[in-house]
Amino acid sequence: MFVFVTIILVFVAYTISIKFVYYRYGQLWPHLRNKISTPLYTVGNSNFCPTHVRSSASTRKSEDEKPRVTASETRALLVTAHPDDECMFFAPTVLKLVESHAALYLLCLSTGNYNNQGLQRKRELLDSCAVLGIPSDHVTIIDDKELPDDPAVQWSTALISSLILKHIRNYSISVVLTFDGRGVSGHANHIAIYKTLRHLASAGRLPQGCQIFSLHSISLLRKYLSVLELPVSWLFPSDFCCLIGREEYKRAKFLCLTYRSLNRPY
Ligand SMILES: [Zn+2]
C-alpha cells in the first residue's frame, strides 16, 4: 500500500513539474525574444546556442549601442540539408518563431534525391512548410549536383558559403539556425552546413550582428526519453529553448508521417 501511494505521489509531482516547465517555456518569453532580436548581442553557448566561433564584429561594445529591435523584426534563416529536416528536427523552433511573428526563411541545400525521389520530396517540403507557417516564397530548395543527398559525399564549403551568404544579404538575415557539429543525426550533409557556418563566422565573413544558433545534438538515451527529457533540459539551460505543447507536437508528428519518402538516411 505504501509503495502504491508513493508511486502515485511521485507521478502527481512529476506531472505538476512538467506542467510548470511547459508553462514557463511554452512561449518565446521576452527574455528569449531579446536574445534573438538584438543582432549585436551574442551570448554564451549551451543547448541551442550561438556557435563557439563568432565574427569579431558581432560583439556589442556597450549597452548604449544596444539596437532597438522588436521580436517581430527578427529575420531568421533556417539552413537544412534535406526535405524533412525542417519538421524532423526543427519543428518546435519553426513553430515558435512563426508564432512570434519573426520573418522566417528556409534554405534547403538539396532536393533529398537519395532514392531518386527529389521531385516528390520537393513537393513534400513545400507542403510541410505550408503547415508550419513558412510561406512558399520564403522557401528555397537547391538542386545542384555538387550537393547531393548523400552522406558519403563531402559538400563543398565554398559552394555552401556562397549560397548562405547570398541569402543572408538578400533577406537581411539577423539569425541563422542550423545543425551543430554532430549534425543531430550524424549525417555528413548536416555537419557540412555547421562547418561552413563556423568557417564563415571565424573568418569574419558574416554581416555585422548576424548570429548563428546551432541545434544541440543529444544522446540517444535523452532523445527517446520523451516527456521525461523535460527535467533534464531544465537542468541544462539553453540560450534558445523552444518547447511545444500537445497540439503543436501532434502537428509536427503528423508532418513527419506525411513525408511518404522518409525511407532514407536522415
Ligand atoms: Zn537531413
Image (cartoon, rainbow, N blue to C red):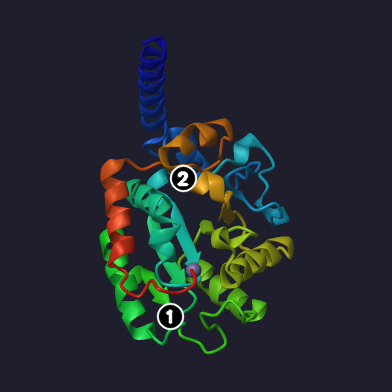
Image quadrant where one finds the N terminus: top left
Label 2 residue SS: loop
Q: Is residue 184 above or below residue 141?
A: above
Can residue 38 be seen here? The reply is no
Q: Which mark is residue 69?
A: 2
What amino acid type is highlighted by mark number 1? Thr
Residue 259 position, x and y percent, is 32, 69
Residue position marked by numbered label 1 in the rendering: 111
- Residue 225: % across, % down: 47, 42
Using the image as rendered, state which of residue 217 and residue 213 is in the foreground.
217
What is the x, y in percent for residue 158?
Answer: 66, 79
Q: Is residue 130 visible?
A: yes
Residue 190 appears left or right of 143: right
Q: Nearer the viewer, residue 175 or 48?
A: 48
Name the residue: 30% across, 73% down: 260
Which element is circle 1 on? loop
Contact check, label 2 and label 1, Cβ < 8 Å: no
Where is residue 40 shown, x and y percent of the image? 60, 48
